[in-house]
Image: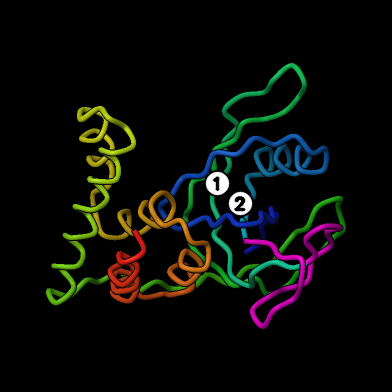
Amino acid sequence: MQAFLFPLPGLILNPMSKLTLNIFEPRYLEMIDKAVKDDIPLAISPSFEKGEDNAVAIEHESTPFVYKYCGFGKVQILGTTPENTKLILVEGEGKALITNVSSAHSFNEVDLACVTQETELSESSTFIYRRIRDLTREKLSERLKNESEVTSLMGHIKDPQSLVSFYSDHILEDFEHRLEVFASNNLEEKIALLGRYRIFH
């Protein structure tokens, strides 16, 4: 599968999560327009200044490496300002390995190999799952101060996969922890990692 690559320092697109971005750089405005026009997914991968074991080199002047795995999803333009910046929504559809990078345009195109996710949750993980769900509600209550908003938001987090994505995106503060959760392809392992990280809250 082909996709356009958007390298972002410190940001991860988990499957089933939603990411809202404000696009202003000309090459990325061009990329977004082409992605929407040609129905090409957007691949989002954390970017780095220096190469690491799990890094892939790309054409980019400030962060010339990205993590070899990315989240990908469909792009929706929510609005355009008079200054021609665009507010977009990317809905995470899956995870993939970057197998090839091309810089024929002013931005990077990538070939992706989709990664299968193990999504079954055994009874032995149910307690940790429920505890993380309770903790998510607690954290939302602290931040939102409006119980009806908390209840509404929790109503959209209906299954373990959604909870893992939401918790990783909005509760976990440490980027290395978020990356470790994203790196796993097993839901039970992700839940176990989140359970272990609770001591940092």
Q: Mark on residue 74?
A: 1
C-alpha gap between disc 1 and disc 2: 5 Å
| Magenta segment main secondary structure | loop
Q: Is residue 47 above or below residue 166?
A: below
User: Three-letter amino acid code at disc 2?
Assistant: Pro
**Secondary structure state at the residue bearing disc 2:** loop
The residue at 52%/68% (across/down) is 176
The residue at 36%/64% (across/down) is 200
Percent from the top left, x then y, of residue 166? 37, 51
The residue at 41%/49% (across/down) is 170
Nearer the observer, 156 or 138: 138
Which quarter shows the C terminus? bottom left
Q: Is residue 68 above or below residue 161?
A: below
Percent from the top left, x then y, of residue 79? 61, 24
Q: Residues within 10 Å of mark 2 (few under 14, many from 20)?
A: many
Residue numbers of the magenta segment: 46-64
Displayed quadrant of residue 172 = bottom left
Q: Are marks 1 and 2 in contact (CB under 8 Å)?
A: yes
Residue where numbered disc 2 is placed? 41
Q: Residues within 10 Å of mark 1 (few under 14, many from 20)?
A: some
Displayed quadrant of residue 27 = top right
